Amino acid sequence: MLLTFRIVTNASIAIYRQIIDQVRHGVATGSLRVGDQLPSVRGLAEHLAVNPNTVAKAYAELVRDGVVDSQHGKGFFIADRRQVFSQDECDRRLEQALNALLSEALVLNFTPDQIRRAVDRKLAEITAARSTEQRTES
């Protein structure tokens, strides 16, 4: 696992949400692969100096969403997402994420062109990171 967790305690984003977002980003970029083990709840809580319930809440949501598998007595592992959701569910989730992203961007007064450029830039960044990760594992 090549993921280093970083949280911002005074951010407007809840700590458990920051943990979830970082795991999801790690999966998206390929720095977290199927079968990679996440730190234990207690271990990550100590590392981040947060309440273990905060980490447990993040992990529970990741399990519920099919990003992570919980193996009793062994820990939490990155799940094989290809087996988790139907195409309809994937489409629904993408639509939901896009609606949230676009609504927020428009509220912040970004133009459609600025939004497109930002999305293209971020997609290129994540795709490049994923490609680099795949080359290093070969």
Image (spheres, grey):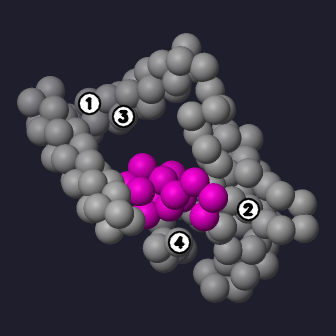
The residue that disc 2 covers is: 76
In this view, 126 is above or below 99: below
Mark 3 or mark 4: whose residue is earlier in sequence: 4
Residue visible at 48% across and 72% down? 3
Tell me the kind of residue under disc 3.
Answer: Leu
Could you say which is closer to the camera, residue 32 or residue 118?
32
Q: Position of residue 69 (x, y in %)?
A: 73, 51
Q: Amino acid at mark 1?
A: Leu
Q: Secondary structure at mark 4?
A: loop
N-terminal-most mark, 3 or 1: 3
Q: Amino acid at mark 4?
A: Met
Q: Which residue is mark 4?
A: 1
Helix, strand or loop at label 2? It is strand
Nearer-N-terminus badge (2/1):
2
- Point out the frontmost of discs 3 and 4: 4
Q: Earlier in the sequence, mark 1 or mark 4?
A: 4
The residue pinned by badge 3 equals 101
The label nearer to you, 2 versus 1, is 2
The foreground one among 97 and 84 is 84
**Tag 2: amino acid:** Phe
Write down the residue under mark 1. Answer: 106
Is residue 81 a member of the stretch shown in magenta? no
